[in-house]
Amino acid sequence: MMKSLKNHSAKKNAFSLLELLIVISIMVILTGAFLVPKFVGVKNKAKIAAAKANIITIKTALENYYIDCGKYPSDNAGLRSLVEDTDNIGIHWNGPYLSRVPKDPWNKEYVYAADTANASYAIKSFGADGKEGGTTVNQDITE
């Protein structure tokens, strides 16, 4: 009788495998609930930083183009002029100024607008949603 009572109390104090799995599952779910938003935020910040870095690279190529050609590419020719002579500049075009025109981190084209009257331009990415304006990850990125 004593032996049977001892076994019964030992079983009562131990956790079953199922109970341990449930506790571990709950811990994993709670940990994920706290960590996933942090990783999403880091990923979005990295994409915004990558877009800004690409814009700086494009601006450098545009400045080199301007030095050689005396003007920035037209709106019609766009950023493609940094890869091939789409503006028909001829002998002054010493490109390619980029090996390829990069897309933004959301796989969309950068927006390029030339102001030929003032010898200036604007480059931007519309962010994750691909639409002008927005906030946080959807905001327009210029540099």
Image (cartoon, rainbow, N blue to C red):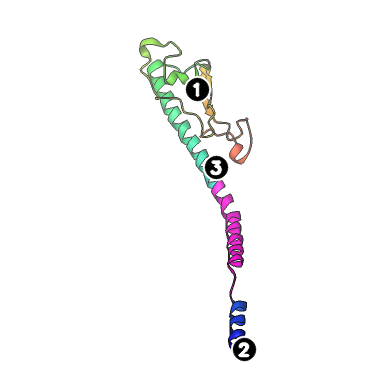
Prevailing secondary structure of the magenta residues = helix
Q: Which mark is residue 47?
A: none
Q: Residue at x 60, y 89 (%)?
A: 2
Give the number of the mark in front: 1 or 3. Answer: 3
Give SS at disc 1: strand
Magenta segment boundaries in residue numbering: 14-40
Residue, disc 3? 44
> Quick one: label 2 or label 3, which is nearer the N terminus?
2
**What amino acid type is highlighted by mark number 3?**
Asn
**What amino acid type is highlighted by mark number 2?**
Met
Q: Is residue 36 magenta?
A: yes
**What amino acid type is highlighted by mark number 1?**
Ser
Most foreground residue, 96 or 116: 96
Residue 2 sits above or below residue 67 on the image: below
Residue 78 pos. (x, y %): 50, 19
Give SS at disc 2: loop
